[in-house]
Image (spheres, rainbow, N blue to C red):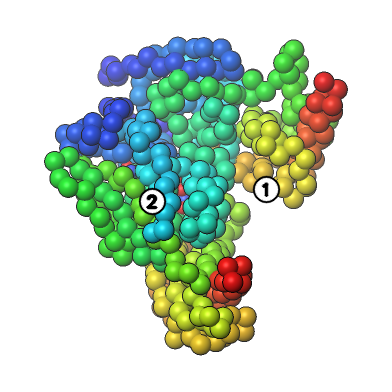
Amino acid sequence: MKPPVFEYHRPGSVAEALDVLAQTGHDGKVLAGGQSLVPLLNMRLAAPAHLVDVNWLGELDQVPCDAGGVRVGALARHARVEHDPGAAEAVPLLGQAIGDIAHTTVRNRGTVVGSLVHADPAAELPAVLVLLGGTMELASAGNRPRRVAAADFFVGPLESALRPGELATAAHFPRPPAGSGSAWVELARRHGDYAVCGVGVLVALDQGLRVSSARAALISVGPVPVPVDLTDALAGQPHDAADWAAAGRLAAAAVDPEDDIHASAAYRRHLAGVLTARAARSAAAAAASRLEASA
Amino acid sequence: MNEVLHETHLVVNGVPRTVSVPARRLLSDCLRHDLGLTGTHVGCEHGVCGACTVLVDGRPMRSCLLFAVGVEGAEITTVEGCRAAGGGLGPVQQAFQDCHGLQCGFCTPGFVTTITAWLAEHPDPTEEQARQAIGGNLCRCTGYQNIVASVLRAAELIREQEAAR
Ligand SMILES: Cc1cc2nc3c(=O)[nH]c(=O)nc-3n(C[C@H](O)[C@H](O)[C@H](O)COP(=O)(O)OP(=O)(O)OC[C@H]3O[C@@H](n4cnc5c(N)ncnc54)[C@H](O)[C@@H]3O)c2cc1C
Ligand code: FES
Ligand code: FES
């Protein structure tokens, strides 16, 4: 269990990192927190010839928040984003979901953007980005930076739309509209494990505290996060007495999980329904208390 | 094959150290093999068990998921650095002895470092909080009851020390 030989690069600026990535192309890999990449190297499941260590690019260690949402720079660690007061105010779902990623020790090093690029079908943050309709910012030498919508970024299990030579510089999580609330709910065998099933829900209420729209994104039930519109099950119903089970049924019908050693497909589908119902109820409660606090 | 060596500077338990290591040298192996600090244990080498946990600039991290070159210039605290200022057992180590928080001791270094950092920010934890704090560390023989008790006892010892100051 020792990593294979690689050539190590420690660029001092984003421009320099992009040059190295352009030169190394298919043979190069970005090393961010290493919390997914280093296990793969240790187990010899990956053997890139070049590693480009971006941990020295202080310019990417930023989490600016504004009216539009939160822009998480590529070097922002999970732990930092989890506890950032600006991010918590603008996009509460981000901190809610990060709390379920592994343990503090892993969150102290792993990055939000690294988790998105890694595109694990059991990872929380890809679903958060999909649910909120966020975007990835991708840079490469000699080209204008491109932005890719979350819906197009997650291509398959452990596969994103990142091209060889590209550096993901940031992820943008849009602020949900006023009057909305969110919740993250997941089931894992032990706290900190990857979820057997997990779901984020965003519920928007009208002035009368009735549901105007609701949607979910689920993990561990497909190759990429599965978005589900729950509005048909909940629209017009009171924030504290809607038909949550109906929302759960919509989610269970929308997913197509597979059997694996952790759980059967039927159990995962069952969880999709139960957890979506729970998350929808909490998201509506959160929306109501936000509206009441601002009234 | 001759691998390129990188001169790397670390401050380990307060002592500046320079090592010449290949880029693929894990921090865990650097501590154990290059620096002879075998207190840091290696269980799984993929981030799951927590035995290799050390503090990097005060924060607990898996040393099996870090390259020594990747933490150039950092301050590293290993279990050897968790002893009392004047020598002898530090408060967390003392608490493990008091509460029988270890049997074989393989997992213990990762617990001691993790708990040392955590108590600095949570001086008066509840049992439930103590249980969560050690959620990322596996122990295969003691059982967690005595380790949870050790966290609470360590908090008590640290508070007593501070009061005596
Ligand atoms: C024990 C354990 C439990 C875990 N549990 C969970 C969990 O429950 N949920 C969860 O979501 N994650 C979990 N993780 C993974 C963790 O969240 C990782 O931190 C994250 O997936 C990857 O982020 P990183 O910064 O460590 O990326 P790295 O490991 O450095 O990189 C991962 C991949 O992304 C690429 N990459 C990273 N950053 C960039 C960039 N800026 N531009 C281009 N490519 C880039 C790398 O080349 C590599 O292919 C766990 C990890 C461990 C060790
Ligand atoms: S050896 Fe590092 S976590 Fe197990
Ligand atoms: S004391 Fe033996 S594994 Fe914990």
Q: Is residue A263 visible?
A: no
Dot 1 surroundings within 10 Å: few (below 14), some, or many (20 or more)? some
Report the disc number at residue B107.
none
Q: Tell me: A264 left or right of B125.
A: left
Q: Write the residue at 53% across / 54% down.
A: A88
In x, y percent, where is residue B99? 82, 34
Q: Nearer the viewer, residue A246 or A135?
A: A135
Q: Write the residue at 27% across / 35% down.
A: A14
In x, y percent, where is residue A256? 40, 74
Q: Name the residue under label 2.
A: A71
Q: Which of A278 and B135 is in front in this view?
A: A278
Q: Tell me: A136 left or right of A82.
A: left
Q: How many labels does the image show?
A: 2
What SS does tag 2 mark? Answer: strand
Identify the chain of the residue marked 1, using the numbered disc in the image. B
* Quadrant including the N terminus of chain B: top left
* Quadrant including the C terminus of chain B: top right
Q: Which amino acid does label 1 sit on?
A: Gln
Q: Marks 2 and 1: which is nearer the front?
A: 2
The answer for how far apart the CA atoms under marks 2 and 1 are is 30 Å
In x, y percent, where is residue A282? 59, 71
Q: What residue type is labelled 2?
A: Arg
In x, y percent, where is residue B115? 68, 35
* Up-down relation of residue A139 to residue B108 (above or below): below
User: Do pointers 2 and 1 mark residues of a single chain?
Assistant: no
Report the disc number at residue B132.
1
Q: Nearer the viewer, residue B157 or A219?
A: B157
